[in-house]
Image (cartoon, rainbow, N blue to C red):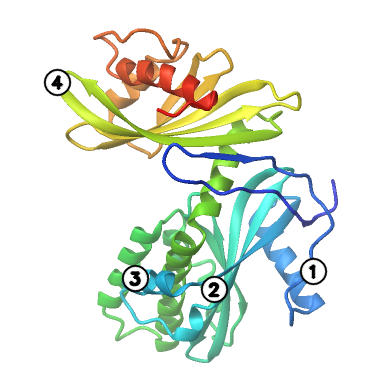
């Protein structure tokens, strides 16, 4: 296995509507210097944290950000409890990679707890859901058992809204007959999860989106060396109903700059609820797969998605295929955006 070290990957940022993002993920390079004040022991501990959280990873890199005043206000508004001023300063997000593909995130937080400062490492997916957590420092006697508790299981797979519900339920629960020290560290941990997700979604949203897109691109096109992302909003008229569809396209290219295919995300309101779909398109613009981006049990939507497999993206819409009108619109739009023409 290749040596594990920090990855200096070139990542771009999304621009505005109908804008373009191009980035070419770089191979692993020499680790960049650690932040001032960080000891060799602390760096080695971070490496252990990353690779235990994501065993498939062989490299990682850190992304540093300062929380701006406007971001601070947004974070404070999202949380149902007060946050101390010193908690929202400079932050570092660790990104685990396998080769050039991002596989997960690690974010460490230091919390004020009953028995002094407690440090928690949060393991997160690229769509910002909790994988798990690990206490790195703390004097509470329950921290090790809490990592394997029912609460830890309940936190697995949760997003920010679900964490907020777990915290609210914990606050409402009658804890009179429970160990006060355990209740205290449970609350501290749930609040830490809420803060971690609020900070990620506010401070690193653009870079995490880029990382997630890159992972999706490599899953479908593992030989890609460059990706270009374009976004736009386009009106779709269907059966007397008009809706604005937000479209994001990730184009994949090989080392000879040949087009390999693309991943498309569409989000639109069908008049009843919002539907978000992911489309996999090959180099000849045939649909490889279409699926909802969320785990939805809508049988009719999943059936409509399955009907599109193998269909030419630009084929004329037909009444028996509900999503064919959207596919036909994408047939023209995706080709135009790839050529750099604005819609």
Q: Is residue 190 left or right of residue 240?
A: right
Q: Nearer the viewer, mark 3 or mark 1?
A: 1
Residue located 44% across and 10% down the image: 311
Around disc 4, counting alpha carbons within 10 Å, would you say few (fewer than 14), some (14 to 19), or many (20 or more)? few
State the CA–CA distance, disc 4 to disc 2: 58 Å
Residue located 51% across and 48% down the image: 209
Q: Nearer the viewer, mark 1 or mark 2?
A: 1
The percent coordinates of residue 302 (x first, y second) are: 34, 25
Q: Any mark on residue 240, and which?
A: 4
Which tag, 3 or 4, sits closer to the chain's start?
A: 3
Q: Is residue 237 above or below residue 249?
A: above
**Residue under numbered circle 3:** 167
Image quadrant holding the C terminus, namely top left
State the CA–CA distance, disc 3 to disc 4: 45 Å
The percent coordinates of residue 288 (x first, y second) are: 51, 18
Residue 156 seen: yes
Q: To which quarter of the image does residue 176 belong? A: bottom left
Which tag, 3 or 1, sits closer to the chain's start?
A: 1
Q: To which quarter of the image does residue 318 belong? A: top left
Residue located 37% across and 22% down the image: 305
Around disc 1, counting alpha carbons within 10 Å, would you say few (fewer than 14), some (14 to 19), or many (20 or more)? few
Residue 125 seen: no
**Residue under numbered circle 2:** 145
Q: Look at the numbered disc 2 and give the secondary structure of its residue.
A: helix
Which tag, 1 or 2, sits closer to the chain's start?
A: 1
Q: Are marks 3 and 4 in contact (CB under 8 Å)?
A: no
**Residue under numbered circle 1:** 33
State the CA–CA distance, disc 3 to disc 2: 19 Å
Q: Look at the numbered disc 4 and give the secondary structure of its residue.
A: loop
């Amino acid at each position: 296995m290749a040596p594990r070290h920090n990855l200096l990957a070139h990542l771009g940022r999304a621009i505005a509507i109908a804008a373009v993002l191009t980035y070419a993920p770089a191979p692993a390079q020499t680790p960049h210097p650690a932040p001032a004040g960080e000891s060799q022991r602390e760096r080695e501990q971070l490496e252990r944290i990353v690779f235990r959280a994501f065993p498939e990873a062989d490299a990682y890199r850190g992304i540093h950000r300062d929380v701006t005043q406007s971001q601070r206000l947004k974070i404070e508004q999202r949380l149902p409890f007060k946050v101390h001023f010193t908690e929202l300063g400079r932050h570092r997000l660790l990104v685990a990679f396998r080769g050039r593909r991002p596989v997960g995130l690690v974010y460490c937080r230091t919390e004020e707890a009953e028995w002094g400062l407690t440090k928690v490492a949060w393991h997160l997916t690229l769509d910002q859901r909790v994988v798990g957590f690990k206490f790195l420092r703390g004097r509470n006697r329950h921290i090790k058992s809490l990592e394997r508790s029912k609460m830890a299981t309940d936190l697995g797979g949760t997003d920010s809204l679900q964490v907020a519900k777990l915290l609210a339920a914990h606050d409402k629960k009658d804890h009179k007959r429970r160990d006060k020290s355990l209740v205290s560290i449970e609350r501290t941990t749930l609040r830490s999860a809420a803060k971690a997700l609020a900070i990620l979604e506010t401070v690193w949203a653009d870079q995490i989106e880029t990382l997630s897109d890159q992972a999706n691109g490599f899953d479908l096109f593992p030989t890609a060396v460059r990706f270009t992302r374009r976004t736009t909003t386009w009106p779709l008229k269907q059966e007397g109903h008009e809706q604005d569809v937000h479209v994001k396209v990730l184009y994949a290219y090989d080392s000879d700059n040949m087009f390999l295919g693309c991943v498309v995300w569409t989000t639109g309101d069908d008049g009843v609820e919002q539907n978000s779909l992911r489309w996999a398109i090959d180099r000849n613009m045939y649909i490889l797969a279409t699926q909802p981006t969320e785990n939805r049990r809508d049988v009719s939507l999943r059936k409509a998605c399955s009907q599109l497999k193998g269909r030419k993206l630009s084929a004329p819409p037909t009444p028996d295929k509900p999503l064919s009108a959207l596919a036909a619109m994408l047939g023209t739009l995706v080709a135009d955006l790839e050529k750099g023409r604005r819609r």
